[in-house]
Amino acid sequence: MKSSTKDQAEGKFHKVKGKVKEIAGKISDNPKLEDEGTAEKIAGKVQEKIGQVKKVFEK
């Protein structure tokens, strides 16, 4: 698997995982979990963008 594809896939996974944590934190009234979810979601977006940039430069 190409590095760019791997980064994009992992980024999407982290975005989804972060969103789940964020929702779980809201439901359980746990601001720490909600913040963790937000941070992981942002990290996933960054990683996904890195994969997109790598894909452009691989061509």
Image (cartoon, helix red, strand yellow):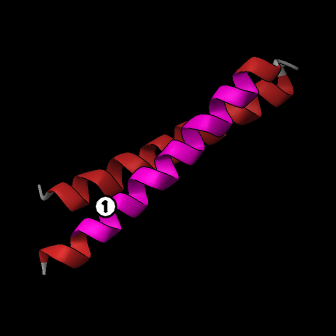
Judge whether residue 46 is colored magenta. yes
Q: Residues within 10 Å of mark 1 (few under 14, many from 20)?
A: many
Instruction: Tell which of 27 and 5 is nearer to you.
Output: 5
Quarter holding the N terminus?
bottom left
The residues colored magenta run 33-54
Q: In which quarter of the image is residue 3?
A: bottom left
The residue under the point 67% across, 38% down is 38
Residue 25 position, x and y percent, is 77, 25
Residue 51 position, x and y percent, is 31, 61
Image-based side of 27 in relation to 35, left or right:
right
Mark 1 element type: helix
Instruction: Tell which of 17 and 51 is nearer to you.
Output: 51
Query: Taking 9 as reference, is 25 above or below it?
Result: above
Judge whether residue 36 is colored magenta. yes
Q: Main secondary structure of the magenta part?
A: helix
The residue under the point 64% across, 33% down is 37
The residue under the point 75% across, 35% down is 23
Image-based side of 23 in relation to 29, left or right:
left
Residue 49 position, x and y percent, is 41, 62
Of all residues, the one furthest to the bottom in this rendering is 59
Quarter holding the C terminus?
bottom left
User: How many numbered circles does the render carry?
Assistant: 1
Instruction: Tell which of 2 and 27 is nearer to you.
Output: 2
Q: Which amino acid does label 1 sit on?
A: Gly
Q: In which quarter of the image is residue 30?
A: top right
Image-based side of 45 in relation to 8, left or right:
right
Q: Quadrant of residue 48?
A: bottom left
The residue under the point 23% across, 71% down is 55
Please give the residue where the numbered disc 1 appears in the rendered image. 51
